Amino acid sequence: MADLAWMAWTWQTGLFFAAIASLLLIMTGLAIYRPETERVGILRIPTTRGDRLFISLLGSAFIHLAWLGLVGPDLWWASALSLLYAAAVFRYV
């Protein structure tokens, strides 16, 4: 196994990567069993489920960075806000 000391592998880091891997597996399964069609939402651009997932992840990263800069290191509320944001993106975008 390669030397992995360059990164702080904590249970939170492992949970983050496991969540991303799970999301990708779920999206792959959905694409196989329920083929997706492009949808035009509030942004007026055609998006697929994968596009909306990417927009959700990118927005969540910005929410967490802004929370760290403006509020502090307690990120539970930022995570809740990110889940609400992701729900809105998948519903309206």
Image (tube, rainbow, N blue to C red):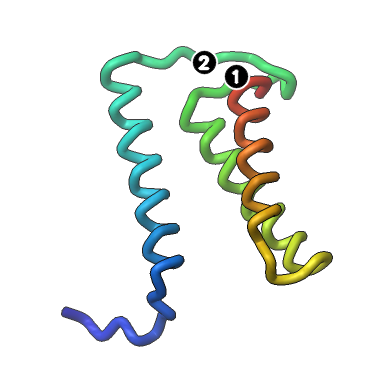
**Circle 2 crowding by C-alpha within 10 Å: few under 14, some 14–19, many from 20:** few
Side of 39 where 18 appears, left or right: left
Q: Nearer the viewer, residue 38 or 88?
A: 88
Q: CA separation, marks 1 and 2?
A: 5 Å
Q: Residue at x 27, y 21 (%)?
A: 32
Relative image position of residue 31 (x, y in whole percent): 33, 23
Judging from the image, what secondary structure is the residue with disc 2 in?
loop
Indicate whether 1 appears above or below 36: below
Q: Quadrant of residue 65?
A: bottom right
Indicate whether 27 appears above or below 32: below
Q: Nearer the viewer, residue 1 or 68?
A: 68
Q: Quadrant of residue 73?
A: bottom right
The residue to which callout 2 is attached is: 38
**Circle 1 crowding by C-alpha within 10 Å: few under 14, some 14–19, many from 20:** few
Where does the N terminus fall, quadrant-wise? bottom left
Relative image position of residue 93 (x, y in whole percent): 66, 24
For the image, the number of numbered tags is: 2
Residue 46: mark: 1
Indicate whether 93 appears above or below 35: below
Identify the amino acid type marked 2.
Glu
Q: Quadrant of residue 22?
A: top left
Q: Reading the chain from its start, which is encountered first: label 1 or label 2?
A: 2
Q: Residue at x 34, y 33 (%)?
A: 26
Side of 7 where 86 appears, left or right: right
Q: Residue at x 41, y 49 (%)?
A: 20
Judging from the image, what secondary structure is the residue with disc 1 in?
strand
Marks 1 and 2 close (CB-CB < 8 Å): yes
Identify the amino acid type marked 1.
Pro
Q: Residue at x 65, y 46 (%)?
A: 80
